[in-house]
Amino acid sequence: MGNSQTAIIAMKKPRTKRTQENPVRKKKRGRNPKTRKAKGRGFKEAADVDNRFQGKGGKFDSLSATADSKEGAMKSVDGWVLFVTGIHEEATEDDIYELFEEYGSIQSLDLPLNRRTGYVKGYAVLDYKTFAEARSARNALHKANLLERIIRVNFAFKVPPRKK
């Protein structure tokens, strides 16, 4: 072949416009849009709609006062849950555990951290086994000082108000 190489270039056919002389029209591919089946949510046929939620518009189950509710607080599955707010951002689980341990055995302690900063979000969730332990911790530590900040302690689950 030598130094000169021949290049083969594929040329596209020029498009022809429809004119009176060339009335050829291309067929569109695909199905008829009227019979086309739409995908995704909200495109079900009337016969395919699930009827199990009809007639319950806006009616939800609610918790009622049970034998496990005392003084406006309700028991959760794990025990009596306290919600502690106003926690200093540099507080540790040990600081909170030591403060609340005096009032009973703590089943669990959750102290969420901010992912971006790595500091405490400002609240904690504690579980006590018995109501007496949770009540004594709440009464003693509500508006107490922890690392120069006032914390507030309340029950996480409360009995809903009665309907009149």
Image (spheres, rainbow, N blue to C red):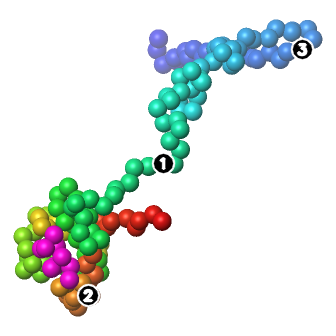
Name the N-terminal-most of marks 3 and 2. 3
Residue toward you, 98 or 24: 98
Magenta residues (range): 131-139
- The residue pinned by badge 2 equals 143
Judged from the image, the secondary structure of the residue bearing numbered disc 1 is loop
Residue carrying label 3: 19
Residue 110 can be seen, yes or no: no
- The residue labelled by disc 1 is 59
Kindly identify the amino acid type of the residue bearing the numbered disc 1: Lys
Residue type, numbered disc 2: Lys
Label 1 and label 3: CA atoms lie apart by 65 Å
Q: Residue at x 57, y 33 (%)?
A: 42
Q: Whole-percent x and y of residue 46?
A: 60, 24
Q: Which residue is drawn at 17% across and 85% down?
A: 140
- Image depth: mark 1 or mark 2 in front: 1
Marks 3 and 2 sit apart, C-alpha to C-alpha, by 87 Å
Residue under the image location 9 percent in, 78 percent down = 103
